[in-house]
Amino acid sequence: MTYSVSFSEITSDDGVQFIDVRSPIEFVKGHIPGAVNIPLFADEERAEIGTIYKQVGKTQALQLGEKIARPKVDAILAQIKSFHPAKLVIYCWRGGKRSTEVCRLVNESGTAARRIQGGYKEYRREIRSFIERPLKLLMVGGKTGSGKTDLLLALKERKVQIIDLEGLAHHKGSVFGHINEKEQPSTEQFENVFCEELRLINPEELLLLENESYVIGSVHLPPPLLQQMRAAPLLIIDIPLQARIDRLVREYTSTDRQQLIEACQRIAQKLTQPKLQEVTTFIENDDFASACKILLGYYDYYYNRGLDKRKNQEISYLTLNGFDLDADVVTVIQMLRGLRGDLAK
């Protein structure tokens, strides 16, 4: 009896619980969002089996694998069965030996489970293909402190299609971007989570993304997506300087002072040593507004330089209040209504 199923057959299936039986290091690198890692082998065990496979042979590697796995079977089955009555879908790297055997044992124990044909490797192939599909993008840009993310999230509440790239990357995109954020995912896992968001998007409707460089912290954007982002129209929101300063002060005022100073030191060469010392002194004295004003001068200079290079991109500007998010949302929605009318012509 076969229990295999292609990933495309189950993506819209409610109540599915993915079980990843790969080693922990494989899981951390990338996995299907929502999956639970119940590894058949520890990292060291997998490495040992791989060495035997290369240096001795396949038969001996399989024998070692069975010897290592046998004492774990009851505990693994108990873990997997604890997720019942969810629809269990098991996978490994290529949909081979590990997932086949675990799936067989689960079913023989009386609990229904399926395995993914081609495993995680096939899932990744589908991910890359899905990310390449054409999108109707509008990029939203603006200088540091403009509140682009807050604006996008507020627009989402008004049923505007957005994907929060920085939220998925757990990074705000600057040298301060890691502060108050969770650990960043791998680039591979970012793509997996991004694709889950993308599946909810209507490709015929406008999708708003924040204008990003090719890298957000340590996460690299998928080249096919970045190519579409660079070709899409760019809307730059213009926010009063004081509103930007106020926002940054609110965001970072509770942050450890030394952490802020260390972030500033990463741009010391471009900021210049005298200005770095000024900023450091302001932070140490809790004068965040003065520190932000100097830092924004640095960021604005390089933002404008980068904008000058976008000669082939359609760029428009929209002035917003900056102090009233609700009012700004209304202004953007009015602009989008006009834009949709132009697109329909």
Image: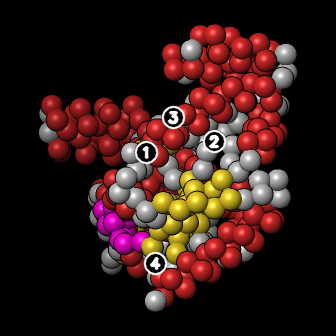
What residue appears at the point 63 percent right and 56 percent down from the top-left corner? 237
Q: How many marks?
A: 4
The residue to which callout 3 is attached is 302
Q: Residues within 10 Å of mark 1 (few under 14, many from 20)?
A: few
Badge 2 or badge 3: first in the primary sequence: 2
The residue to which callout 4 is attached is 203
Q: Between tags 2 and 4, which lies in front? A: 2
Badge 2 or badge 4: first in the primary sequence: 2
Badge 1 or badge 2: first in the primary sequence: 2
Note whether 153 is above or below 30 in the view shown: below
Mark 2 secondary-structure assignment: loop
In magenta, the rendered stretch is 125-135
The residue to which callout 2 is attached is 144
Q: Between tags 2 and 3, which lies in front? A: 3
Q: Between tags 1 and 4, which lies in front? A: 1
Which residue type carries mark 1? Asp
Q: Are marks 2 and 3 in contact (CB under 8 Å)?
A: no
Magenta highlight on residue 131: yes
Kindly tell me whether residue 294 is visible in this rendering: yes
- Residue 15 is marked as none
Tell me where residue 143 appears, x and y as whole percent: 61, 45
Mark 1 secondary-structure assignment: helix
Note whether 200 is above or below 51 in the view shown: below
Which residue type carries mark 3? Tyr
Which residue type carries mark 4? Pro
Q: Are marks 1 and 3 in contact (CB under 8 Å)?
A: no
The residue to which callout 1 is attached is 308
Which residue type carries mark 2? Thr
